[in-house]
Image: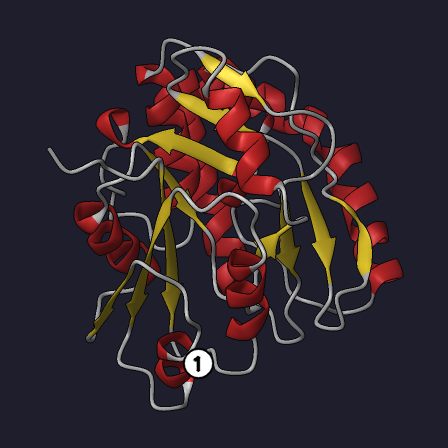
Amino acid sequence: MIKKPLFSIITVTFNAADVIEDTLDSIRLQRMHDYEYIVVDGASRDDTLEHVKQSGIAPLRIISERDRGIYDAMNKGLKLAQGEYLIFLNAGDSFAGDDALARLANKAGEDDFDILYGQTQIVDKEHRVLGSRHLTAPGELSADSFKQGMLVCHQAFVVKRTVAPLFDLQYRFSADYDWCIRCLKSSRRNGYVGDRPIVNFLIAPTGTTESNHRASLKERYHIMCKYYGTLPTIIRHLSFIPRYLAEKRRKRRLGKRGECNSCNI
C-alpha cells in the first residue's frame, strides 16, 4: 500500500512570477518533508510555471488551465490532493519559519484532530513583518467562533481532507469564510498549534478594488445570516463598528496596501 503524505500544500497561481519564489523558498526550507505540492495555475502568461518547475520541490503536480476564479482553482487542487491534511498557501504567502510544517505535524500527532490552526503575521514584499492580523486565532475554536468574523486566516486553517467540502462557487470573494464555517461544523476536534505564527500573509501593493471589498463584505454578511441568523447578525455588526474604525486607522498607518478580502473582517 502506497503511503499517503501527511500534508497536501496547494498553491493557486496566475501571473505570479514576481511573488511565487517566496512561497517556493519557504516550502524548500521546511525541515519536515512529509508533503506533496500541488500548483493550480490559471494559464499564466509570465514565468510562473518556470519558477515552479525549477523549484526542486517533490513530489510536485501542476495543472495549468483557465478557471472560473480562485475558488474554482482551489477546488481543483482539493480534488487532486492525496494528503491527510490540506494547506492552501497562496502565491506570495509563505510558512513562518522552517519548522512550521513540523509544528503542525507534531500537533497532528497529539490527537485525531480534524482541523489544525494557528496565527498569521502580515509581511510586505521585502519580507518585513508588519504585525499580526487584527483578528487573533483563539485557543479554542468552533463554528460559533466565526460569528466574530474570520478569526483564523484560511492559510493557517489546515483541514483534514476527509472532512473538507468543496468551496461554494456562488461566493466570488468570501467562499473561504463559508468553507471554514462548514469545516468547523463537521469537525470533532480542533488543535491549536500555538501563539507563534505558522504563516506569513503577503500584503500586495495593488490589493482589491473598493467595489470588490464592498462585494466581499456583502457576501460575508449573507454568510453570517445563513449560519447565525439575520437579527443576531445585524446586532453583532453594530458591535463591529469600533473594530472597523480601528482597522481603517491601522491600514492608514501601514500605507495604502491590499488585504485578503475574507481575512479582514
Answer above or below: position of 145 versus 49: above
**Type of amino acid under label 1:** His
* Residue 179 position in % (x across, y down): 35, 35
Quarter occupied by the C terminus: top right
* SS under mark 1: helix
- Residue 85 visible to the viewer: yes
Residue 168 drawn at (x, y percent) = 25, 42
Residue ID at (23%, 50%): 75
Residue 211 shows in this picture: no
Task: Name the one closer to the observer, 264 or 88.
Answer: 88
Q: Residue at x 53, y 40 (%)?
A: 101
Question: Of 252 and 238, which appears nearest the observer?
Answer: 252
Who is closer to the viewer here, 170 or 75?
Answer: 75
Specify the quadrant of the image occupied by residue 224.
Answer: top left
Scheme of image coloration: secondary structure
Q: What x and y, as percent, mark residue 228?
A: 43, 17
At x 55% / y 82%, what residue is drawn?
A: 18
Residue located at (46% from left, 39% from top): 220
Q: Compared to 135, does 247 lie above or below?
A: below
Circle 1 is placed at which residue position?
51
- Near mark 1 (Cα within 10 A), the count class, few <14, some 14-19 or many ≥20, is some
Q: Quadrant of the N terminus?
A: top left
